[in-house]
Structures are given as structure tokens and as C-alpha cells.
Image (tube, rainbow, N blue to C red):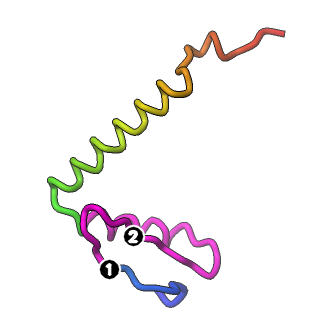
Amino acid sequence: MEDWLGSFRPLGSTDMAILKLRRDDDRAEAEFELDYLTSLTTRERFELMLRKSREMALLLRRHERRRTTEVIKRA
């Protein structure tokens, strides 16, 4: 990828990789994400998935998750 300002390198499970592009490129972003995920072990992928699931549950509780009927206001 000649448009990358930096090249991808696998990082430890506590570090996050960051992609910097000169211009928007959905294909490069998808390739970068797949490269990152395939660089992780199965255990690291499951830990990432579980951490993100807990993060989403916390956000839903923090922002008072409401049912669809409570969100929609009838005019």
C-alpha cells in the first residue's frame, strides 16, 4: 500500500494499531483491520471480543438503554 504513511506491524494485546492514510480508502482500512485481526492469536481475539462486549454493555447501562417504543416519540 503506497498510500500508507506508516506500515502495519502486529502489536501486543495491550497495544492498538493505528492506520494513517493520506486520503480515505475503505479497501485499505478493511485490509488493515484484517491484517491486525489475523495477527492475533485465537485467545487474543476472544479476549478482544469479550472486552468489547463488556464495553458495549457498560455503555448501554450508562446511557439508560431504552426500548424502541420508549425512544420513538409519536407526533
With 29 as the anchor, is 75 left or right in this view?
A: right
Residue at x 32% of width, y 80% of height: 9
Q: Amino acid at mark 2?
A: Ala
Q: Quadrant of residue 63?
A: top right
Q: Residue 41: which disc?
A: none
Q: Residue 9: which disc?
A: 1
Badge 1 vs badge 2, beta-carbon distance below 8 Å: yes
Relative image position of residue 34 (x, y in whole percent): 35, 65
With 45 as the anchor, is 32 left or right in this view?
A: right
Q: Is residue 29 magenta?
A: yes
Relative image position of residue 54 (x, y in whole percent): 34, 36
Q: Is residue 32 above or below residue 5?
A: above
Please report the bounds of the magenta region as a residue range: 9-38
Relative image position of residue 24 (x, y in whole percent): 62, 72
Q: CA distance from mark 1 to mark 2?
A: 8 Å
Residue at x 51% of width, y 84% of height: 4
Of the 4 image quadrants, the one containing the C terminus is top right
Mark 2 crowdedness (10 Å alpha carbons): few <14, some 14-19, many ≥20 = few
Foreground pick, 26 / 68: 68
Q: Which residue is mark 2?
A: 17
Residue at x 49% of width, y 68% of height: 29
Foreground pick, 69 / 27: 69
Q: Is residue 2 magenta?
A: no
Q: Amino acid at mark 1?
A: Arg
Relative image position of residue 66 (x, y in whole percent): 56, 16
